[in-house]
Image (tube, grey):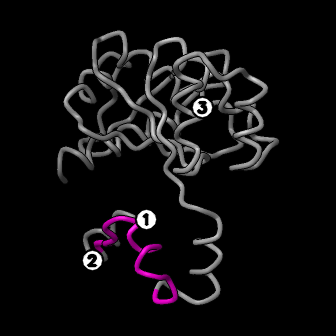
Amino acid sequence: MTRRSAVLAALLAFLAAWAPPAAHAKLIFRLRDASTLSTAQLIASLRGARVIFFGERHDRAEDHVAQRTIMQALQETGVPLAVGMEMFRRDAQPQLDRWVAGTLDMKALRGLYDGNWDPPLFEQYRDILLYARQERIPLIGLNIATAIVEQVGRGGFRSLSAEQRRQLGVNSCDVSPRYADVLH
């Protein structure tokens, strides 16, 4: 198991073991060696990671509390952060930058969110968005334009124009047996 996948496995185990929102983690289980970690040990293991993927269930507040807790712990140790969010399209980036800079109000952010994602879930992400603003942590819109998603759904990737494919960047997927095992 690579260091990156070990860190990801530890993080996912951390999220799975997360207690109710008002509490703290009861157990962080590292799959690699079946050991338990303290929150401080988890943060120490994440400090050297270039990218951290947070697994989440969109509608589970405790997952977002865990994300926010880890963001804060990493921030407090001086790790430079940026938070990529799938619930914002890339074309929302100027407004996300304004939010972090303090020049976009909550009502406008809520409208931006509602136009990009599932409106009832906003409250699940609210504390992460507020913390990013408070600490000036960049928020990055990761999703692509709805029209492109719909076009690929109707006509496949080959139906996209060269310009549309350019907007998507480099696309590759490792479908090796090892990767497939990680997904199962």
At label 1, the amino acid type is: Gln
Task: Find the distance from the CA under tag 3 to the CA under tag 1.
Answer: 29 Å
Q: Is residue 89 magenta?
A: no
Q: Which label lies toward us, 3 or 1? A: 1
Q: Which residue is at 35% across, 45% downward? A: 9
Give the residue pinned by disc 1: 167
Q: Specify few, some or many for label 1: CA neighbours under 10 Å numbering under 14, 14-19, or 20 or more.
A: few
Q: Which residue is at 32% across, 45% downward? A: 31
Please state which of residues 52 and 26 is positioned toward the viewer in this rendering: 52
Give the residue pinned by disc 3: 64
Q: Does 45 appear above or below 152?
A: above
User: Which of the two discs, 2 and 3, labels the residue nearer the N terminus?
Assistant: 3
Classify residue 65 by image quadrant. Answer: top right
Q: Which residue is at 52% across, 42% downward? A: 85
At label 3, the amino acid type is: His
Q: Which residue is at 59% across, 34% downward? A: 95
Secondary structure at numbered mark 1: helix
Q: Specify few, some or many for label 3: CA neighbours under 10 Å numbering under 14, 14-19, or 20 or more.
A: many
Please state which of residues 26 and 167 is positioned toward the viewer in this rendering: 167
User: Would you say 40 lies left or right of 57 here?
Assistant: left
In percent of width and height, residue 145 lies at: 59, 62
Residue 154 shows in the view: yes
In percent of width and height, residue 51 lies at: 30, 41
Q: What number is the disc on residue 83?
A: none
In percent of width and height, residue 176 lies at: 26, 76
Q: Is residue 167 magenta?
A: yes
- Region of the chain picked out in magenta, as a range: 158-174
Give the residue pinned by disc 2: 177
- Give the quarter of the figure containing the N terminus: bottom left
User: Would you say 52 lies left or right of 122 here?
Assistant: left
- Give the quarter of the figure containing the C terminus: bottom left
Please state which of residues 156 and 177 is positioned toward the viewer in this rendering: 156
